[in-house]
Amino acid sequence: MSSHPIFYILPLFVPLLQVYICLAMSLVEMRFLAASTRQGDKPCAHQFPTQKPECPACQEAESPEPIPEMPPVIEHHLGRPRSVDTSNHYCPNSSCSYYGWLGLNNIISNGHPNGGRWRQLQCVVCGKYFMETTGTIFYSSRTPPEIIWMALSALAEGLDMRGTARVFEVKPDDVQHWLEQASKHMETVSRYLLHDLHLTQVQVDELWALIGKRQEKHKRNAKWVWVALDPVSKLFLAFVVGDRSLPTAQRLIHAVAQVLALGCVPLFMSDQWAPYAAALLTHFGYWCKTPRRSKYGRPPSPRWKPLPILHYVQVVKRRINGRVVGVSHKLVYGSMAMVEHILSQSGVGINTAFIERMNLSIRQHVAALGRKVISLAKTMLGLEAQLSLCQIYHNFCLPHSSLCLPLPEPQSTKGNGSPKKWQKRTPAMAAGVTDHIWRMEELLMFRAPPWRQAVNV
């Protein structure tokens, strides 16, 4: 039986069969890539919902309070001109008609009580006296302000709480208290300054985080940090801490929609995580009437469809044994021709490299998100506090090397050093939010008014 000639020929066909299988798989993959990157290719037809998807953030959002009528500007005709600029302070008395208004000349300086560092201000309308640190973390604090803002700067640069306490010779509880106060203040300042942005691209992604305090005895308390970034200006738009589910994705896209200008719908790019498509459809959709197919019967219900100006592309990575061996693109909303036109203006292609690089920056500046560290956040609120500090520090205080602009003429520096040829810019400067690099003490002393007004910082 073993001497039959077929047993000698069969081993020769095995390599040929393997080569044929490999060629067939390569041909199928090439066709898939060509189909996914073809210009003008339409997304796969899917059933759009007859009801608008629910967003927990939209349901929790409160209606804005009406802005009162602006009172007249007070003119001072007697005495010498005012030398102390109080245009960025407002009366904290809610019963005063000038409450919350800036630059109306109703605030005057009343000197330094007991020879202290901070000025005392007064509203000439209601007679209210208040310190210039009212509404900041320096109010009624006995610690020197230099230690507070330097400690917060160290936290923003990635130093953990206990290390910060050892460096500045204070208690860890004091550092934690400053962080809690600063995070609330930074959220208010960021919400006040980041608004009505005209963006062309937005990249979203999520990174894994570990909370130190376990909810169950033998189970780790793992969370996900969802991040949104403008790849053009490197502006850290929003973040959300939660589980990896659709409601959390809804909160992230809701936060992004809050900072966009009216009618601005940028190009969104992400990985192949499915909830992003549903979250974008929720906030950038409209009711579309379905045409009748027959004159008999009930008319079809309207469908909630994406806006025609919404473009969303997913970067699909194919992995083998944990290694990326292929990258393709999947168009979910919009047209591929328009996507390539938008990306051609910035000179980049379809990718998620900028948001992935931002994830690395977050892990470097937030001690609780570092790899293999012992400085984990005990609660989710503590992690959110560190992320709030990291967000505003990245946007306003940290210059980005890729955003530098060449100076018209080199500027000489002190000493024998080479002249300055580049102007440093932060993401907020690149986005047109501010015109200078902020310091940490500026952010901590900035009092955001109850409603948006022109502020001269």
Image: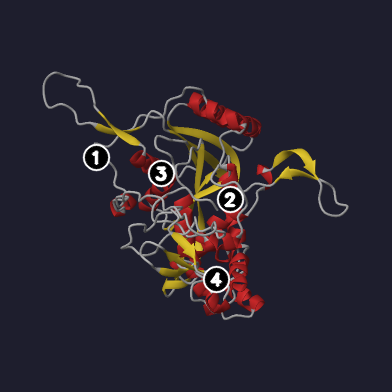
- Of labels 3 and 4, earlier in sequence is 4
Residue 263's disc is none
Instruction: Describe the element under mark 1 as helix, strand or loop.
Output: loop
Q: Which residue is mark 2?
A: 358
Is residue 322 visible to us here? no
Q: CA distance from mark 1 to mark 3?
A: 20 Å
Viewer-proximal residue, 218 or 441?
A: 441
Q: Position of residue 401 (x, y in %)?
A: 69, 47
Mark 3 nearby-residue class (10 Å; few <14, some 14–19, many ≥20): many
Q: Which residue is mark 3?
A: 257
The nearer-to-camera label among 3 and 4 is 4
Q: Which residue is mark 4?
A: 118
User: Amino acid under label 1?
Assistant: Gln
Choose the circle earlier in sequence order: 1 or 4. 1
Amino acid at the residue labelled 3:
Ala
Colour pattern of the rendering: secondary structure
- Tell me the mark number nearer the camera, choosing from 1 and 3: 3
Give the foreground label among 4 and 2: 4
User: Which numbered circle lies on residue 51?
Assistant: 1
- The earlier-in-sequence mark between 1 and 3 is 1
